[in-house]
Amino acid sequence: MNNDTEDIILAQARGPWQRDILYAAAHNGRATVGLSGKARQYKARYDHSLRTLNDRLRTIGWQLEIIPGPRGGTSISDPGREARLVPIDQRER
């Protein structure tokens, strides 16, 4: 991923949690999106935040893909849940 693409992707973030996810996904290939501690009480808000971030990413041809856990779950309320940044096909937009 070149610097221009990375800048465009990072510009889609609204707030530090989204920015941290996109930065980690762009630099490490994966980002931890799982919630722990008190953050789990606000799961619905984090879910909404992740959905709106993904909506913005899709408009520029990318998406965050949640990596399923060992039993296939994709809930972000599981600590350690990860996501990766993947390009999407033009037809899916």
Image (tube, grey):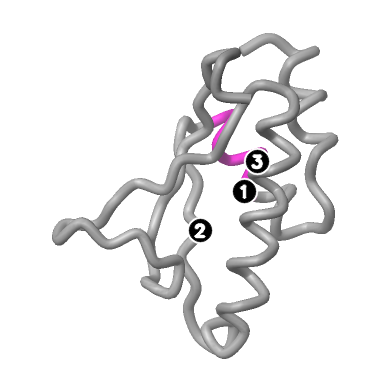
Callout 2 secondary element: loop
Rendered-image quadrant of the N terminus: top right
Q: Which x, y percent locates residue 79? A: 39, 70
Q: In this view, does 3 lie to the left or right of 74?
A: right
Label 3: few (<14), some (14–19) or many (≥20) C-alpha neighbours in 10 Å = many
Label 2–label 1 contact, CB within 8 A: yes
* Residue that carries the numbered disc 3 in the rendered image: 22
- Taking depth in this image into account, of 5 and 71 the one nearest to the observer is 71
Which residue in the rendered view is the most extreme toward the left? 71
Q: Distance between the residues labelled 2 and 1?
A: 7 Å
* Prevailing secondary structure class for the magenta stretch in the rendered image: helix
The numbered dot on residue 33 is 2
- Corner quadrant of residue 92: top right
User: Upstream in the sequence, badge 2 or badge 1?
Assistant: 1
Q: How far apart are marks 3 and 2 (CA)?
A: 10 Å
Label 3–label 2 contact, CB within 8 A: no
**Which amino acid type is marked by label 1?**
Ile
